[in-house]
Amino acid sequence: MSASYCFEGRVVLVTGASSGIGAETAIHFAAASCDGLALIGRDKDRLEEVSIKCQTQGLAIEKILIISEDLASDGAPGRIMDAVIQKFGKLNILINNAGQGGMTSLADPELSQKFDHLYSLNVRATLLLSQLAVPHLIETKGNIVTVSSICAKAAVPNMLVYNLTKAALDYFTESAARCLATKQVRVNSVNPGSIATPLHTRAGREEKVVRELARRIHPLGRIGESEEVSRAILFLASDHASFTTGETLSVDGGRFLLCP
């Protein structure tokens, strides 16, 4: 699956690993011979399923750590990082994938509550987990890859708060990259367009409607697949991207080429 990449001797932490892009990314790292893989998510049963798929790619069960946590809950980033270091003794790669979408506008009567929830998960949790990872990444000269969105580059109607949180993640990537470059720690992000993941249905949109809309708004004429994003993540996390930092890489079927 990931024969062109090799992550031997490297420990990888993937948040939001129970489904979609996170699950696919974890499976790809397993296939690329990583030395340790921490799977973070809220649904333990689904994490177990992803773990089994990672094992079918050749990763031994003792090299997999499952942590069932809500990243937005108090103290979760600290508990996660402590568990990873206790298990593996180091961290080489942090994949900040956990996040949530949702429809919001300035007319939304629940705007304040939705902002607090999405900001806490999409931005604050990413920031705090990355902060805790930095000392370990400096030791290993590792890197961070964050899953942002094309919404950070071109605002999507009726997704006000989601747009804001993803724009914040892009600025986090650029700012952290500048801060950590002298420490030889790279920081990059991927910016997917519409991808076929459970995120859409959880946000209240029908899959058929999402796919039809994706066909019309992406120049390539279709929705993207999780595997297409995970390949970009592995590239940025690998030595193939050793001279790349501060990049926000669009994986969007050309969507950003169109006028918002």
Image (cartoon, rainbow, N blue to C red):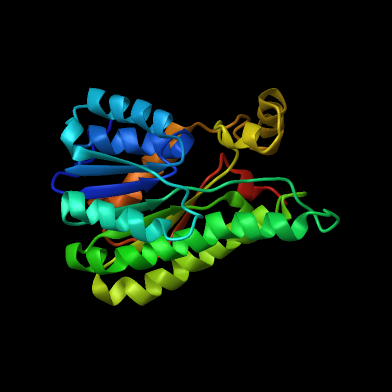
Depth check: give the residue in front, 211 or 128. 128
Q: Residue at x 18, y 38 (%)?
A: 63
Residue 153 in sight from this viewpoint: no
Quadrant location of residue 224? top right
Q: Residue at x 56, y 43 (%)?
A: 252
Q: Residue at x 19, y 54 (%)?
A: 86
Residue furthest to the left? 9
Side of 38 where 233 appears, left or right = right
- Is the residue 54 above or below the residue 146 in the image? above
- Is the residue 4 above or below the residue 168 in the image? above
Quadrant location of residue 241? bottom left
Residue furthest to the right? 107
Give residue 208's position: percent from left, percent from top.
69, 23
Give residue 239's position: percent from left, percent from top.
23, 52
Depth check: give the residue in front, 84 or 260. 84
Side of 128 where 100 appears, left or right = right
Give residue 36's position: percent from left, percent from top.
20, 43
Residue 123 in sight from this viewpoint: yes
Give residue 139's position: percent from left, percent from top.
18, 67
Q: Quadrant of the N terminus?
A: top left
- Is the residue 18 above or below the residue 71 in the image? above
Depth check: give the residue in front, 92 or 224. 92
Quadrant location of residue 186? bottom left
- Is the residue 68 above or below the residue 173 in the image? above
Q: Residue at x 25, y 52 (%)?
A: 84
Depth check: give the residue in front, 244 or 234. 234
Q: How many marks?
A: 0
